[in-house]
Image (cartoon, helix red, strand yellow):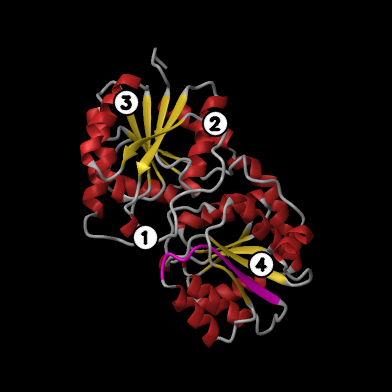
Amino acid sequence: MHNKSIDYLIIGPAHPYRGGIAETNHELALAFKKNGKKVQIWTFNKLYPKFIFPGKTQFSNQNAPKNIDIKRMIHAYSPFQWHSVVKEIKALNPEVIIFRYWTPFLAICYGYIARNVGSNIKCIGMVDNWIPHENKILDKFLNNYFGNGCSSFITLSKSVANEIKLNFSKPILKGFHPINEFLPFPISKIEARKNLNLSSNASYILFFGLIRKYKGLDLLIDAFSIYQKKNKNTYLLIVGEFYENKNKYLRIINNLGLENKVVLYPDFVDSDQARNFFCASDCVAQTYRSASQSGVTPVAYHYGLPILVSNLNGLIKPIKNDDSGIITEINSTSIAKGLNEILQPKSLIKFRKNIQSSRSNYSWKKFNQQMIHFIE
C-alpha cells in the first residue's frame, strides 16, 4: 500500500444497523486489522425509507462492536448529501473503497460516490446478491450503473460471480461466505432446549431467517406434513421476522392440521438468541426457490448443524464439497424424502463429523488473505 491515511474504507451496513451484512462487515474490518491494515467503516445515517422497509426496525439493540472505527456518514437516498461524502472521502484518501452491495436500491448512491472520488482510489464491489430474488424493471440498469464505477468485484459464491460475468469482464474474486468468529460459543442440546422450553426427546427441524416468498417456507411446511405422518415426535421451528403476509403461512399450517407440530418465533433474532435455536435443533432446512449464497450455512457450520438445501448453485457447493447435509429438488415430495434421510441417526452423526473437520476452510483469516492478495 502507498502512503495513505487508511488502507481500506468499507461502505455498507454496520452498527447500529442489524442483520447479517452488518455483522459480516464488522468481521471484515477486524480481519483487515489482524492483517495489519488500517480500516474504517462508513455506514448510513439513513438507509431505507420507512415505507419500503418491511420489517419492524432496521436497528440492533446490541452494543456496538469493540475496536472498529464506524462512522454514520451516508444518506442512501438523498443525492444532495453525496457530494459532501465524496469530499470527505477525498480528504480521508483511502487506498481502496469496498462497497458492500446487495440491492439495486443502493446503485445510484454507490455509483455516484465511485465515479467521483477520483482515479487514485480503487473502488471494488463486494457483492452479496446481483440478480435480486424479486426482480424489478430497473434492476439491470441500476446494476450496470454501479458496476461501471467499480474496477473489480468480490463475491461470496461462484453463482454470484457468474451472474456478474454476464454484464462485466472485470476481475472477480470468487470467494465463499466465512464463518463469523464472534458468534456465541455452542451450548449443549439439553441446555438450549431448556432455554426454549422444548422437549428433550423430540426431533426439531429449523427454518431460520427473514421470511420471504423466495425462501420456500411453504414448501418446507408441506414436506414436513408428509414426513411427520410417520415421524410423530418431530417438530418444525420457524424462526424469523415475516417480510410478507404471516397469515398466508398460518393458513397452510392450520389447513394441514399442524398447529401443534409447528413452533413459531415470528421475530428478528440476534446472535445470542440464534444460538439457542441452532443448538436445540437436529438439522436446518433451506428450501429456497432461488439463492445467490447463504448466511445461514456458516452459522450452521459454527454450531455443527446438518443442513438440507434446495438444488441451487448458490447453496449446494459446501454441502457437496464437505458432505455436510442433503440436497433436494424444489418440491415438497423431494424435501420430505430429504428430511427422512437427514434425520436418520447415522446421517446426523456423519454430517456433524464432516462439518467439524471442514469448518477451518471457511475462516475470515483465509477469506481476508485471499481478498488482500486479489486487491494488492
How far across and how far down the image is residue 307, in percent?
61, 60
Q: Which mark is residue 313?
A: none
Q: CA distance from mark 4 to mark 1?
A: 27 Å
Label 4 packing within 10 angstroms: few (<14), some (14-19), many (20+): many
Q: CA distance from mark 2 to mark 4?
A: 34 Å
* Location of mark 2 (residue): 31
Q: Secondary structure at mark 1?
A: loop
Q: Secondary structure at mark 4?
A: helix
Q: CA distance from mark 3 to mark 1?
A: 32 Å
* Mark nearer the N terminus (3 vs 4): 3
In the image: residue 79, left or right of residue 269: left
**Residue 101: within the magenta?**
no
Q: For the residues carrying marks 4 and 1, which lies nearer the camera in this image?
A: 1
* Mark nearer the N terminus (3 vs 2): 2
Q: For the residues carrying marks 3 and 2, which lies nearer the camera in this image?
A: 3
* Location of mark 1 (residue): 133
* Location of mark 4 (residue): 342
* Mark nearer the N terminus (2 vs 4): 2
Task: Residue at 56% x, 29% y: name it.
Answer: 67
* Location of mark 3 (residue): 89
